[in-house]
Amino acid sequence: MCNACVPMLNDAKPVEAFADQLLDMINQGALSLMVSIGHRTGLFDCMAELPDATLEKISSNAGLEKRYVKEWLAAMVAGGIVRYSPEENTYQLPASHAALLTRSASPDNIAVFAQYISVLGQVEDRIVDCFRQGGGVAYEHYPRFHEVMAEDSGQTVIAALEEHILPLASHLEPELKQGISVLDVGCGRGRALLSLAESYPNSEFTGYELSAETLADTRRQADEKGLTNVHFVEQDLTDFDQQAEENRFDLVTAFDAIHDQATPQNVLNGIYKTLKPGGTFLMQDIRASSKLENNLEHPISPFLYTISTMHCMTVSLAQGGIGLGTMWGEELAVEMLGIAGFAKVEVNQLEHDFSNNFYVTRK
């Protein structure tokens, strides 16, 4: 970069360094889209099972169009994700890379998270309009968000549910085996409830979710599994503090759901109300601080603030809500739980999960 481009600076080196940073950002953003495609098309899974292979072999085994696979492979090679031998004209996905990019690598499959970049890109125009005019972008404008979220939670939450998460409250598993009533707030595609309903047939499970389209798929899955102890209800939780049936449930769960709500305090108040005396509330949410300065060393804080801007905050605002956002943080979460009536809150973290807190409290 020429010094004439920065006439107000005596030293052009900081500008040049920042230019390099921006170029790297653009390259990495582009690679995120390619990684998402590699995951969705099964190319990473296919290549992990092959030794060094030609373009023809890879595209044939994956059942994909050769011309598209060729260009995708070029991006992967240029980005250092796939190795290429020009002498043999072959490509290889190193085992150390496959360990973070394939479905068999779950829960360590980072390719799952790359999908968020393309999903959020679909609403960029609407988000820009919100910057200028206010308001928010409603759930129905995110055609794949629930699908990606379900895959994400399948790795981070569902896979750890019985072995790591339920034991955070030692009384839960015996109670679930004996038979209790359970509510999942903001259940999404219901993967947590479906898993629990299969494992604990003596308990009754109910899921509340705003999206009717999402619930249609969830009910279909329950029917296919032959589950009669789980029910899903289309429910707007904005006034849950008024709507909640008092002393109804033994256990309420909320997996990555509270910060999306229009009125999260009303939801927490309603959860306290609907719990039976002695009942348990188990909440999973993003591990972060309520203070920006405490999140600067978080390994994915730019990603999380982007998710907040382009989904979690804006869907709340679209409902006329407060737009709490993804990064509401541990301090505010504990404070709001206290306002709801929960006097003692345990904040737990799992060794294998750097991105989530697990809050356990009782009525």
Image: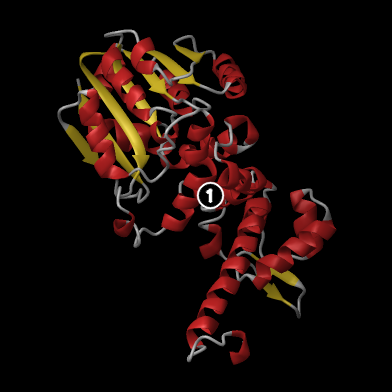
**Residue 241 x %, y %:** 34, 16
Indicate left or right for 62 with 246 as reference. Answer: right
Q: Splitting the image into 4 quarters, where does residue 53 fall?
A: bottom right
Q: Nearer the viewer, residue 9 or 360?
A: 9
Q: Splitting the image into 4 quarters, where does residue 259 fall?
A: top left
Q: Splitting the image into 4 quarters, where does residue 6 fall?
A: bottom right
Examine the rendering and report whether any part of residue 223 can be seen. yes
**Residue 226 x %, y %:** 54, 13
Asked which secondary structure carries label 1, the reply is helix
Classify mark 1: residues with Cα within 10 Å, few (<14), some (14-19) or many (20+).
Answer: some
Looking at the image, which residue is at 55% across and 36% down?
135
Q: Amino acid at mark 1?
A: Phe
Q: Which residue is mark 1?
A: 113
Does residue 268 lie above or below 79 as drawn? Answer: above
Q: Nearer the viewer, residue 107 or 129?
A: 129
**Residue 232 x %, y %:** 50, 15
Looking at the image, which residue is at 77% across and 66% down?
54
Examine the rendering and report whether any part of residue 108 can be seen. no
Looking at the image, which residue is at 27% across and 14% down?
273
**Residue 15 x %, y %:** 52, 82
Indicate left or right for 51 with 362 as reference. Answer: right
Figure disc tally: 1
Quadrant containing the N terminus in the rendered view: bottom right
**Residue furthest left as drawn:** 343
Quadrant containing the C terminus in the rendered view: top left
Does residue 7 lie above or below 332 as drawn? Answer: below
Identify the image's colour scheme: rainbow, by chain, secondary structure or one colour.
secondary structure
Does residue 177 lie above or below 19 as drawn? Answer: above
Q: Nearer the viewer, residue 338 or 48?
A: 338
Looking at the image, which residue is at 74% across and 70% down?
90
